[in-house]
Structure formats: C-alpha cells, structure tokens
Amino acid sequence: QVQVVESGGGSVQPGGSLRLSCVASGSIFRFYDMGWYRQAPGKQRELVATITRGNSTNYADSVKGRVIISRDNAKNTVYLQMNSLKPEDTAVYYCNVNFGSKYYWGQGTQVTVSS
C-alpha cells in the first residue's frame, strides 16, 4: 500500500501562484509514475499533469504554459507549480501514484481562485 499526502492548497486571487506538493511512501518512489488531477464541484475528475519515472511530462490543454510538474526522488515528492491562476482552476487537487498496475490517491487539497 502506498500512502499519498498532498499539501499546499489555499485561496489565491486571479493571476496568483501556488505550489502543491505530494509525498508518497515507499523506498522505490523513483519507479512511480505520478500525476495531478482535479475535481471541481459538479464536475468529473480530470487530468492536470503527469510525470513518468523517466521524467516525461504531459499537461492538459487547459493548463499548458501555466503549470509545471516536477519531482524530487530524494524527497519522495512531486510538485505542481501553478501560475497565472484563473477562477476556473478552482477545484480539489488530487495526487495519483501509478505503480504495478495499481493506482493510489491522496485525500486532496483545495485550491480556490477568487477575487
């Protein structure tokens, strides 16, 4: 079982920035494929960004150019740097671990973008 814990959410004005962090348990973190997803009220959970064990990244069109996903294997942590935030970015953000054909989720962290 992989434990996943997100942090870094909060309230920010439009145009602001936030950095989300996700710590996953396990001594083989470097072999995990990681991702960030989000779910807004009344909507389905959607992909934001992913990063593979080989550091290949993928972004949803809605966040391209505004968001950067990165990882620090020494700290078992994946980050999501979000810039130029918009009200439509408001959602609960979830971290995902994909390993051994299994998926593990954190509890989520709330991001609210409002003036």
Image (tube, grey):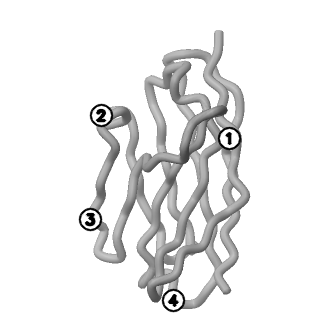
Are the two marked residues, 4 and 1, in contact with CB atoms closer than 8 angstroms?
no
Q: Which three-letter amino acid code belongs to the residue tagged 3?
A: Ser
Q: Give the mark nearer the N terminus: 4 vs 1.
A: 1
Q: Is residue 72 above or below residue 25?
A: above
Q: Give the mark nearer the N terminus: 1 vs 3.
A: 1
Residue 83: quadrant of the picture: top left
Depth check, front residue: 16 or 94 = 94
Are the two marked residues, 4 and 2, in contact with CB atoms closer than 8 angstroms?
no
Q: According to the image, label 4 marks what residue?
A: 28
Dot 3 alpha-carbon crowd within 10 angstroms: few under 14, some 14 to 19, many 20 or more: few
Q: According to the image, label 2 marks what residue?
A: 65
Q: CA distance from mark 1 to mark 3?
A: 24 Å
Identify the mark at residue 56; answer none if there is no mark. Answer: 3
Q: Secondary structure at mark 1?
A: loop
Q: Is residue 11 left or right of residue 59?
A: right
Q: Secondary structure at mark 4?
A: loop
Q: CA distance from mark 3 to mark 4?
A: 18 Å
Dot 2 alpha-carbon crowd within 10 angstroms: few under 14, some 14 to 19, many 20 or more: few
Residue at the spot x=52%, y=71% of the render?
97
Residue at the spot x=60%, y=73% of the render?
104
Q: Give the mark nearer the N terminus: 2 vs 3.
A: 3
Q: Which three-letter amino acid code belongs to the residue tagged 4?
A: Ile
Q: Could you tell me residue 28's position as x and y percent? A: 51, 89
Depth check, front residue: 104 or 67 = 104
Q: Secondary structure at mark 2?
A: loop
Q: Is residue 11 above or below residue 30?
A: above
Q: Which three-letter amino acid code belongs to the residue tagged 2?
A: Gly
Q: Is residue 31 left or right of residue 106?
A: left
Dot 4 alpha-carbon crowd within 10 angstroms: few under 14, some 14 to 19, many 20 or more: few
Q: Could you tell me residue 75's position as x and y percent? A: 57, 73
Q: CA distance from mark 4 to mark 1?
A: 26 Å
Q: Give the mark nearer the N terminus: 4 vs 2.
A: 4
